Image (tube, rainbow, N blue to C red):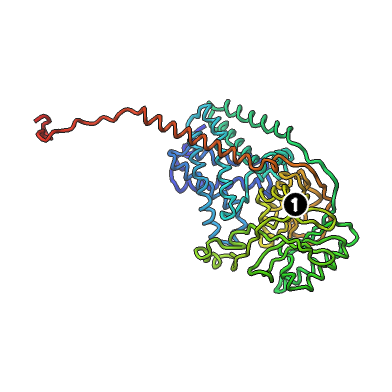
Amino acid sequence: MKRPDRLFGGWLVSPWRRGVVAALAGALPMLAFPAPSWWWFAYIALVPWILLARSAPTGRRAAYDGWFGGLGFILAVHHWLLPSLHIFTVLIAALLGALWAPWGWLVRRFLAGVPSPGQVGGALLVLPSGWLMVELARSWQGLGGPWGLLGSSQWQVEPALRLASVGGVWLLSFLVVAVNVAVAVLVSVRESRMPAVAGLVATAAATSAAWVWSPRPDVDGRVRIAVVQPGVVDGGTSGDKRFAREEALTRELAGQGADLVVWGESSVGFDLADRPDLAHRIATLSREVGADILVNVDARRSDRPGIYKSSVLVGPQGPTGDRYDKMRLVPFGEYVPARSLLGWATSVGKAAGEDRMRGTEQVVMNVGHGLRVGPMVCFETAFPDMSRHLAQDGAEVLLAQSSTSSFQHSWAPEQHASLAALRAAETGRPMVHATLTGVSAVYGPRGERIGVWLGTGASGAMVYEVPLARGVTPYVRFGDWPVHAALLVLAALCVTEGARTFRLRRTAPEPLVPPARTAHESPARPGR
């Protein structure tokens, strides 16, 4: 197969044209995520990007292909931020896209020209490992968090969810990239097809063995959890209107045997200590329904300075004292990083005018029926380590209170709801994702969907029969071991490359140096 630049008759020789093609190639994986949810596309979505980088004339150009492809990827999976952050979204994408520059260089290093069987085998390990390092780096909350991890595109594939219980979303990302690398070699280098096929067979054998070996969660009882979704509420007094709507919907749950009622993020806009009338109304609802109610307070606290987003449990007698303050805040949405430097973002978009305050620790709550639940708020469901720690601390059900009301007409609500399936499968614990305006969803301990979604057009309350499970998944027990393995692979690569460079320098021939002239020699007539 011809190199891409030759296929286009030299059209890709232009750096700017090549950059545009790289950005478009990097954006392709977006279609594997909700709302399209073409999960199968994830296994070939990186192929055009890989083919472009391997054809780069120099390592520097391959790094630029990686950078521009990363820009396209970040911009595509975060496109729903454009109405809120405007041009700042592009600047963030350009910054984060640079994380893929080394990955583009590695693609050319292993796959340029006609790679040997050893190079193909190395690519099947190194390139997925490099991709995991990019995902790990951008998973830092200060860089935006782990939204759009490639493995999360497999949220509705039962075998993939089973593998997530072994190595989390990281293992899925590694496998998806490895398959893309093998496919890229198959379609581009006839001489290297055999090692590519061998790599695919080895990947399939390893994943099949993990799938067969991984233990399944043992269902041990059921609980009835209700989700209250008020829907879009507009107007200057939207906080009071929303509360009244939530109150009316919760009252409809009386007599339905709910063990817990969950409201969405920012469902209460006032600190309950400052508004005992609201606390009394929620406690009255708790008595009528016969279950504790988990609300989410987005307000300035009366007992300490600053605005917090907090999951607060309210029982028949009022707030129980169980409270979780959100720890990981949304950059620009809930705080502005380095506000003294980037505060101008508030003038070009909907960045936070005042930083929210952070909580300090995760909390497992005991609700009125002896159920232990672990709450998270919105963006935190994207972080695998948070749900893992809650499972380790004894949570039987994971809860997420979210809003996404600012992104109603985008793909964000569906993509956010899908993350709960991964968190449930990773931990072997069911997960309830309750929102203000959709999409609300519930998943069982294997990541399977329970009941129906409450979409962005829905306003109502629904009770879900949620299966409980016991046991510990390998991911909860061993943690992010695929990331550690990837680090070892890259460390081995660095050692190998360093030794190779050292060996080449030692065996290089001495440069030819012309004989030095004496002070008595003539430049025109040597020897005189």
Residue that appears at 83% across and 43% down: 219
Q: Residue furthest right?
A: 255
Residue that appears at 36% across and 29% down: 506
- Dot 1, how many residues are within 10 Å of its Cα: few (below 14), some (14-19), or many (20+)? many
Task: Give the percent coordinates (x, y) of residue 402.
Answer: 71, 58
Residue 130 horizontal side relative to residue 42, left or right: left
Q: Can residue 340 be seen in this view?
A: yes
Task: Give the percent coordinates (x, y) of residue 443.
Answer: 77, 48
Q: Can residue 436 be seen in this view?
A: no
Q: Can you say which quadrant of the picture contains the C terminus?
A: top left
Above or below residue 40? Residue 98 is: below
Above or below residue 496? Residue 21 is: below
Q: In which quarter of the image is residue 170?
A: top right
Residue 21 horizontal side relative to residue 238, left or right: left
Residue that appears at 75% across and 49% down: 394
Amino acid bearing label 1: Leu
Task: Give the percent coordinates (x, y) of residue 478.
Answer: 67, 40
* Secondary structure category for the residue under label 1: strand
Task: Give the percent coordinates (x, y) of residue 74.
Answer: 57, 51
Instruction: Return the residue at label 1.
Output: 398
Above or below residue 313? Residue 53 is: above
